Amino acid sequence: MTPVISVENVTFAYGDQPAVRDVSLTVEQGDFLGLIGPNGSGKTTLLHLMLGLYAPDSGSIELFGEPIEAFENGERIGYVSQQATSQAGTMPVTVREVVTMGRFPHVGHGRLTDEDRRLVDEALETVDIADLADRRISQLSGGQRQRVYIARALASEAELLALDEPTVGVDAESRDAFYRLLESLNESGITIVLIEHDIGVVTDRANRIACLNTELYHHGDTESFVESDALTEAYGTTGQVVHHHH
């Protein structure tokens, strides 16, 4: 089975400041990969490289088996950035309108069909925000906004969901519900790559861990990460992972 993402010996720097150095990893179909590391460790940069938002200085990346520079099927990817919730506050659009945007790559210049509308309704139901469909996104809480962007990705029939610290500023109860949603989506077959600063949350939810601090200190299953010294090596202090329910 072709990996969803394949990263080979990738290096990237901002000027003379290395952000990612000689990183190789794969994300297989159905993986739930937690990408962790200290602040400034290159996590967001690596995710941007994986999604083709940045071009590596050296090395190669493939998405769904295609060289990333030639990849054009953006609708296969749902990306929720750190800024998604704050930017949403200024958008004068409804929840349904945002989720419907997920259908635009499939519609082209045509008109929305009944099937497109059904997929939008289904996405709203899946993330449990159907009752908010006509609400302006600016009126939603941070946790609700994140669900809107997940729904947009589902409406586009995305196969890969990439999230960069999606629960910053979200209350604990909403955060737990959000991660239960991610687990459910992963069980339905969607591949997930998640950046999250709470290591306990990652080890509870993800089945694979990539631990980064410019260089990759661990890439493998969650159990082997918990048993390794990667956390101490990457963070430079004695770390302790207190959760792990697999």
Image: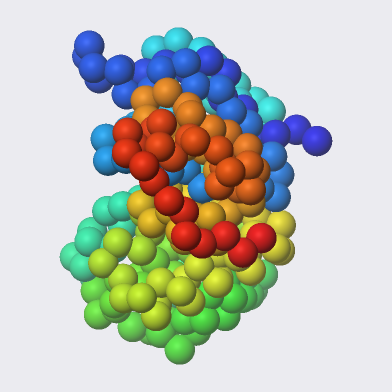
Q: Position of residue 45 (x, y in %)?
A: 36, 32
- Check the image and name the residue furthest to the front: 238
Q: Position of residue 168 (x, y in %)?
A: 30, 61
- Check the image and name the residue furthest to the right: 1
Is 146 left or right of 83, judged from the image as shown?
Answer: right
Is 39 left or right of 225, judged from the image as shown?
Answer: left
Vertical order, 157 against 215 (above or below):
below
Which residue is rendered at x = 47% and y = 16% of the image? 22
Q: How many marks?
A: 0
Is 7 left or right of 47, judged from the image as shown?
Answer: right
Foreground pick, 144 / 155: 144
Determine the image quadrant of residue 60: top right
Q: Is residue 199 visible?
A: yes
Which residue is rendered at x = 27% and y = 40% of the image? 39
Which residue is rendered at x = 22% and y = 11% of the image? 16
Which residue is rendered at x = 48% and y = 50% of the image? 194
Determine the image quadrant of residue 116: bottom right
Q: Is residue 80 visible?
A: no
Vertical order, 68 against 174 (above or below):
above
Foreground pick, 206 / 98: 206
* Type of colouring: rainbow
- Quadrant in which the N terminus is drawn: top right
